[in-house]
Every structure is written in structure tokens, then in C-alpha cells.
Image (cartoon, rainbow, N blue to C red):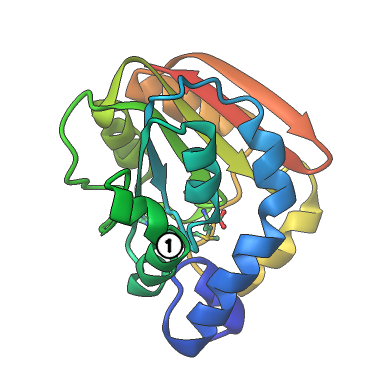
């Protein structure tokens, strides 16, 4: 297994190194994407594919009276996200759960916002996962997708060649899947090779 497979599902020691690296390496694109997310200070937010938990920490800062939950199917990611957000977990404002985005344990219409940083590339059945995200969002709630690779150039092929099960979606493909799941007012933002998509329930 190549070290880069740990981006799809971090496992073992390589996975622990990868989640620490992603917390640092994804910081510029995540901070750029987060500026598009307008949420109330007491919002309930879910971070899907939370990895090492750095974006959960940013969301907790953005919503100082809110609740931030994270879900990831990798035990390594869950452990790191818990460590990074231990103070907020102790305050009862944060929780990290192990599970797949395709079949989430959360109630219908519960979250004001759902975020997905650098993770939709790996979701096995994207239409089903988007329907799940739609289900857990409140009416009027927002989904933010933020990717470092927008699929506009062949440059990105280097990643799909070394990471099995990875698909780099173009903005129009994601928009179509989102609208099929019921989302509306899909907004597309781009900078360099980065892509941020906002959609509303
Ligand atoms: C490249 S990492 C990104 C982590 C973090 N969001 C970031 O930006 O640094 C992708 C993460 O998504 C998780 N993941 C991928 N597909 C998933 C799925 N279907 N359900 C839950 N987690 C998933 C992986 O385990 C991994 O932790």
C-alpha cells in the first residue's frame, strides 16, 4: 500500500503521520473555503471526513456558542480529531464519531451546516452520500465542499494514478449530483486549482 493511500483512509503509523500532515498541508485551502461559510455563532455544524480535526477546530472558533460534530470512517482520523479538539469535547460542544458518510447516525434536519474538506473524492457512492448530507441538514442549511484539486487540468491525474478509489470531480459534475440530491442555489468558487462549492437545502 502506498503512503498516499492514507489520504483515502488513514491506517496505522502511516495514517497517523498523514493526518498530522493534512492538518498542516490543507490549512491554506481550508481557510480560503471557510470564508464562504456564513453561520450563526450558535450553529450546529457537521464536518464529514474530518481527518485530523483541524477544520473542526476552525469551525468551533467560527461558532463559539455552537456545536461541531465530526464523522470519519477511519479510527486513526477519529482518534486524532478527538485529541485536537479535546477541550471542546470536554465542554460538551464537540463530538467525533466513527462511521461512513453514506449511512450516518444523525437525526434528520439537525445541522445548520455540513462541511466536506478534501474528502468527496473518496466517497464511494456520491449520490447516496449527498442524499445523506441533505437528510441531516435543516431546511435552509448549507453544504460546503472544498477541494484542492478541481479537475480542470491533467495535472491532477498524478493523484488518481497513485491513490486507488479517488475521483477528482469537476465543478459541473458536483453541481449535477448536488441538484439530483435536492440541493439548490449551487455556488461555485475557484482560486488556482482550488474549488469551493456551496449548496443549500
Ligand atoms: C484527504 S483526508 C481529508 C481530511 C480533512 N477533511 C482535511 O481536509 O484535512 C480524507 C478523509 O475523509 C475520510 N473519508 C473518506 N471517505 C469517507 C466516507 N465515505 N465516510 C467517512 N469518512 C470518509 C478519510 O478517512 C480521511 O480521513
Q: Position of residue 91 (x, y in %)?
A: 31, 49
Q: Quarter holding the C terminus?
A: top left
- Residue 145 sits above or below residue 73 on the image: above
In-front residue for pair 46/192:
46
Report if residue 153 is visible in the image.
yes
Query: Residue 163: in sight, yes or no?
Result: no
Front residue of 67/150: it is 67
Q: Is residue 18 left or right of residue 125?
A: right
Q: Residue at x 22, y 46 (%)?
A: 104
Q: Against 159, is 143 above or below? A: above
User: At 27% across and 47% down in the image, what residue appears?
Assistant: 92
Query: Does any atom of ligand 1 lie closer than 8 Å to the CB of label 1?
Result: no
Q: Would you identify the image quadrant in which residue 50 lies?
A: bottom left
Report the residue at 44% width, 69% height from top: 80
Seen in the image, is 138 located left or right of residue 41?
left
Question: What residue appears at the point 46 percent right and 24 percent down from the top-left corner?
Answer: 41
Q: Which residue is mark 1?
A: 81
The location of residue 133, given as percent across then percent down, is 32, 34
Where's residue 190, x and y in %? 75, 31
Q: Residues within 10 Å of mark 1 (few under 14, many from 20)?
A: many
* Residue sitting nearer the eye, 161 or 100: 100
Left or right relative to 153: residue 135: left
* Element marked by disc 1: helix
* Number of numbered discs: 1
Measured from the top left, where is residue 115 in percent x and y?
47, 38
Amino acid at each position: 500500500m502506498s503512503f498516499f493511500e492514507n489520504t483515502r483512509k488513514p491506517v496505522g503509523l502511516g495514517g497517523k503521520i498523514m493526518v498530522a500532515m493534512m492538518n498542516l498541508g490543507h490549512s491554506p485551502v481550508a481557510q480560503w473555503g471557510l470564508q464562504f461559510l456564513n453561520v450563526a455563532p450558535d450553529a450546529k455544524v457537521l464536518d464529514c471526513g474530518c481527518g485530523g480535526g483541524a477544520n473542526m477546530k476552525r469551525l468551533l472558533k467560527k461558532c463559539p456558542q455552537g456545536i461541531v460534530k465530526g464523522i470519519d470512517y477511519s479510527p486513526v482520523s477519529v482518534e486524532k480529531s478527538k485529541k485536537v479538539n479535546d477541550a471542546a469535547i470536554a465542554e460538551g460542544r464537540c463530538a467525533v464519531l466513527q462511521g461512513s458518510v453514506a449511512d450516518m447516525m444523525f437525526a434528520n434536519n439537525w445541522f445548520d451546516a455540513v462541511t466536506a474538506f478534501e474528502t468527496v473524492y473518496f466517497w464511494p457512492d456520491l449520490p447516496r452520500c449527498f442524499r445523506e448530507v441533505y437528510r441531516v441538514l435543516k431546511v435552509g442549511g448549507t453544504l460546503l465542499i472544498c477541494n484542492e484539486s478541481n479537475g480542470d487540468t491533467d495535472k491532477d491525474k498524478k493523484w488518481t494514478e497513485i491513490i486507488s478509489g479517488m475521483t477528482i470531480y469537476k465543478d459541473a459534475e458536483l453541481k449535477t449530483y448536488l441538484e439530483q440530491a435536492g440541493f439548490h442555489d449551487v455556488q461555485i468558487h475557484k482560486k488556482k486549482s482550488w474549488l469551493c462549492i456551496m449548496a443549500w437545502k
